[in-house]
């Protein structure tokens, strides 16, 4: 801790549901005796009297008076155990001892190396076959991952990605896509309490080369490449970042079904608009994958019908302000929008940014706005500082154009669209060709 390093005694305060996570994080960072205290959950929408009762009452973990915990933690001298800290041996055996398939499947589940579905056991021969899907050497470092910003990032190489690709049931020809997703640095198993999941969108010639499905059932379990690529990203995320264990390194309160697999291609051939990766500097002839953090909410509809504007506004305002929308539309929907004058994705994106508004009181009451935007507003960063001065009933725009993305996919059996939360972080459209 920077305060401790400066000689200022510090105690970390958490709500009690994070006790295991707090202790595991302290342990992982070599500070097993870090001083911590706890108050009850929840904090949101509690009255001042209720919050004061938290402080004046017992620590729900130690059962001792909370204030006493704080005072003793701040004033007690450091002992030898505090000064010693802790380090870890992070080298794991490359191979397991041979055993029956049944025993190994059980062992993999006990070690939490799976998503609790059966996996393809990663034998040396199978991993070697997967490695033939790329020209990069097995020992090349692909990237680093961690479940949260405050945990140590783990570094991993091509072979470790290949192991997880085999486990997911992927084929060698899919491997460059999986490597590109792994290199993004974005985990598909984020530990946020709000239950993020990862979403991947594939563009370019590789979609057809490996037989991905951007037609009927594109978002469902109807295509081997779509499903196993998404599953591989999820498996490697949990295994190559130090785990994804509920209560320790995963705190999603509800969890997310998209954490099994949520990867699909854009149906470029049936779209009247430019592909997603072209927006981010790639050529149509390039193969690339864009990875999103989100997947917490989904709204759906049909059209655009006569009342599409009202429907779109309702669907988009049901989301969380500043948590970017990923708008997925069937080719029928895209063509109908062009007939309404939206001859590019950007025109529809601009309409959304300008027209999807909420009252200022709702905007500033949003959890993510309070956490991420309010500090910027107080610091004078525009346009947030001006928005902070808005009257409660004034309308504020929920999203900026650069936060909104549109993807065309589907089989044209219905003019259907869906809106997911899908935040694209910087540099998260990655070349697949670079990993061939």
Image: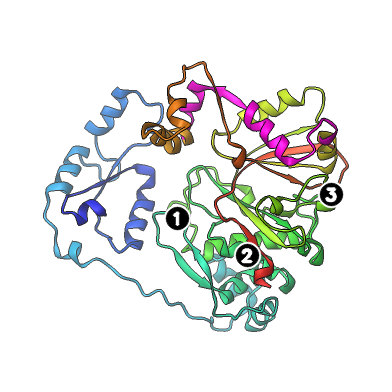
Which label belongs to residue 180? Answer: 2
Residue 361 inside the magenta-drawn segment: yes
- In front: label 3 or label 2: 2
- Who comes first in sequence, dot 1 or dot 2? 2
Task: Tell me how far mark 1 sits from mark 3, CA to CA.
Answer: 36 Å
- In front: label 1 or label 3: 3
Residue 294 inside the magenta-drawn segment: no
In the displayed structure, 120 sits above or below 63; it is below
**Residue at the spot of label 1:** 249
Q: Position of residue 306 (x, y in %)?
A: 82, 23
Q: Position of residue 309 (x, y in %)?
A: 73, 25
Q: Which span of residues is magenta-colored? A: 338-367
Q: Which quadrant of the structure image shows residue 357?
A: top right
Left or right of residue 65: residue 257: right
**Residue at the spot of label 3:** 216
- In front: label 1 or label 2: 2
Is any part of residue 425 visible from this angle?
A: yes
The colour scheme of the drawn protein is rainbow
Which residue does the image show at 81% across and 67% down from the upper left? 209
Task: Tell me how far mark 3 sits from mark 2, CA to CA.
Answer: 26 Å
Q: Nearer the viewer, residue 309 or 104?
A: 309
Task: Tell me how far mark 1 sits from mark 2, CA to CA.
Answer: 24 Å
Q: Nearer the viewer, residue 245 or 258?
A: 258
């Amino acid at each position: 801790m920077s305060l401790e390093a400066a000689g200022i005694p510090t105690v970390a305060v958490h709500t009690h549901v994070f006790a295991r996570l707090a202790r595991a994080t302290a342990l992982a960072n070599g500070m097993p005796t870090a001083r911590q205290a706890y108050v009850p959950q929840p904090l949101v929408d509690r009255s001042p009297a209720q919050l004061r009762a938290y402080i004046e009452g017992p620590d729900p973990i130690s059962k001792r008076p909370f204030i006493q915990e704080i005072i003793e933690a701040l004033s007690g001298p450091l002992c030898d155990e505090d000064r010693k800290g802790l380090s870890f041996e992070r080298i794991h055996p490359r191979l397991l001892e041979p055993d029956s398939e049944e025993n190994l499947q059980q062992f993999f589940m006990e070690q939490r190396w799976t998503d609790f579905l059966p996996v393809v056991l990663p034998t040396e021969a199978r991993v070697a076959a997967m490695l033939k899907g790329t020209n990069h050497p097995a020992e090349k470092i692909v990237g680093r991952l961690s479940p949260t910003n405050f945990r140590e990032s783990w570094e991993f190489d091509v072979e470790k990605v290949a192991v997880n690709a085999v486990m997911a049931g992927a084929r060698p020809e899919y491997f460059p896509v999986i490597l590109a997703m792994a290199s993004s640095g974005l985990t598909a198993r984020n530990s946020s309490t709000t239950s993020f999941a990862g979403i991947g969108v594939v563009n370019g010639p590789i979609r057809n080369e490996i037989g991905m499905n951007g037609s009927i059932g594109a978002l469902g379990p109807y295509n081997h490449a779509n499903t196993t690529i998404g599953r591989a990203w999820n498996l490697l995320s949990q295994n190559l970042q130090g785990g994804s264990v509920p209560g320790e390194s995963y705190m999603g309160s509800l969890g997310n079904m998209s954490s099994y697999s949520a990867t699909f291609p854009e149906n470029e051939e049936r779209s009247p608009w430019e592909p997603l990766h072209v927006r981010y500097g790639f050529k149509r002839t390039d193969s690339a994958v864009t990875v999103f953090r989100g997947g917490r909410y989904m709204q759906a509809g049909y059209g655009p019908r006569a009342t599409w504007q009202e429907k779109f506004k309702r669907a988009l305002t049901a989301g969380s302000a500043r948590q970017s929308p990923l708008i997925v539309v069937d080719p029928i929907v895209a063509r109908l929008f062009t007939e309404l004058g939206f001859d590019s994705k950007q025109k529809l994106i601009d309409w959304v940014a300008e027209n999807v508004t909420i009252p200022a009181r709702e905007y500033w009451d949003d959890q993510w706005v309070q956490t991420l935007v309010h500090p910027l507003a107080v610091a004078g960063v525009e346009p947030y500082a001006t928005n902070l001065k808005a009257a409660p009933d004034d309308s504020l725009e929920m999203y900026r154009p650069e936060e909104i993305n549109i993807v065309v996919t589907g089989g044209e059996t219905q003019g259907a669209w869906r809106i997911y939360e899908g935040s694209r972080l910087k540099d998260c459209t990655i070349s697949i060709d670079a990993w061939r």
